[in-house]
Amino acid sequence: MTTKIDIERIDELIAGYFAQGLNKDELAELQQWLKASVDNKTYFLQAQEVWFSAISANHAVRFDSEKAFQRFLASTITINEKAQIEISKKQKTRFFELNFVRVAAAVALLIVFTGIGFQIGNGRSFGTLADVIVEAPFGSKTKMYLPDGTLVWLNAGSTLSYNQDFGVDNRKIELIGEGYFEVTKNKELPFDVKTSEMTVRVLGTKFNYRNYSDEDEAIVTLIEGKVHLSENSSNKSGYTLIPNQQAVFDKSNKNIAINTVRASYSSDWTKGLISFDEEKLGNIVRELERLYNVRIKIADDSLLNYRFYGNFTRTEQSIEDVLEVLASTDKLKFEQKGREITLRLK
């Protein structure tokens, strides 16, 4: 059972787990405490009730790194009042002395939740728990830390989700779009990234995974360490990549090609860089739409056969700057009305 001596330390660990994530030693400390008694697990579940009540378990709320902290603080008064009411009614553990709420408010980042049910061994329900969903809207990218300390960058138009037992019983996440990962090593818990076509498994490494639903290819690029990837619909053993290798999965024929590349380029987007290397115009257009939050129409289908290359810095060069460079090839021209852009054969 939690003692007066360690209560504040445990509250800090729990709040950190729900917010910005814990490092390896902190996570091990929390796991050891959870395994010590059923009372500790009960305490942890009650902490989750308070945490989720700060955000709303009734509907999804999109991740907003700019407004997150203030939204959490604004909700703490309601949490306090709720906790005090529960104390008088049910005489719950001293967790509801509001110590956890104080600690949580100090470290909070808003996370996105969609409700799912949760029960412990004796069948008692502790309210609605949730999957965590983090989204990088068009025109932006998002940096975050998972509960195990893994660093993740999400590119524009991407979504990442994981269950609340992440880092305790498993390290499984689902990805739509593009993510760059620096995975914290843990030999006992492999790190799995699943998309609609492939799953990548690692123990600790740096890699980039791109799989947008509107693109014809899924691409895994290994920068450091080792990863194993497998096709979700196949019983094949899969492939193991070494640094500076890239796996390209063709969604139409289900084939996987392994290429040698300069892998560090694959994460340039985390630094605000945009790079096209003999890329098809269709892929470039989809990328620009996500990065600049615009709509681009290709009026002449023949343009789809053209490939372009170029390097840009999104924070310094506008969508107009990028389009001017593409137009300078004398292959196309563009018309722009607000956020609507049309590309035509020149």
Image (tube, helix red, strand yellow):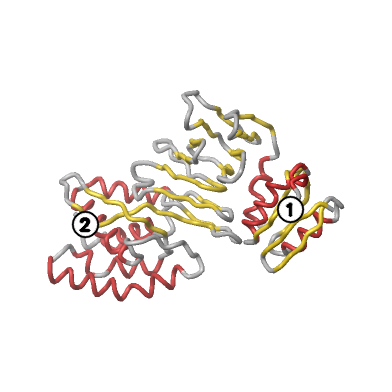
Instruction: Give left or right: position of 164 versus 286.
Output: left
Q: Position of residue 233 (x, y in %)?
A: 47, 30
Quadrant of residue 12 within the rendered picture? bottom left
From this view, report whether residue 210 is shown above or below residue 22.
above
- Distance of mark 1 from mark 2, alpha carbons? 66 Å
Which residue was labeled with disc 1? 299
Instruction: Give left or right: position of 156 versus 46.
Output: right
Q: Please, what secondary structure does the residue beneath circle 2 have?
A: loop
Quadrant of residue 248 within the rendered picture? top right
Q: Earlier in the sequence, mark 1 or mark 2?
A: 2
Which residue was labeled with disc 2? 2
Q: Residue at x 78, y 54 (%)?
A: 344
Q: Are the residues at dot 1 and dot 2 in contact (C-beta closer than 8 Å)?
A: no
Q: Residue at x 49, y 36 (%)?
A: 199
Q: Position of residue 182 (x, y in %)?
A: 54, 46
Pick whichever, 2 or 212, lies toward us: 212
From this view, report whether residue 233 is shown above or below residue 217.
above
Pick whichever, 220 or 28, lies toward us: 220
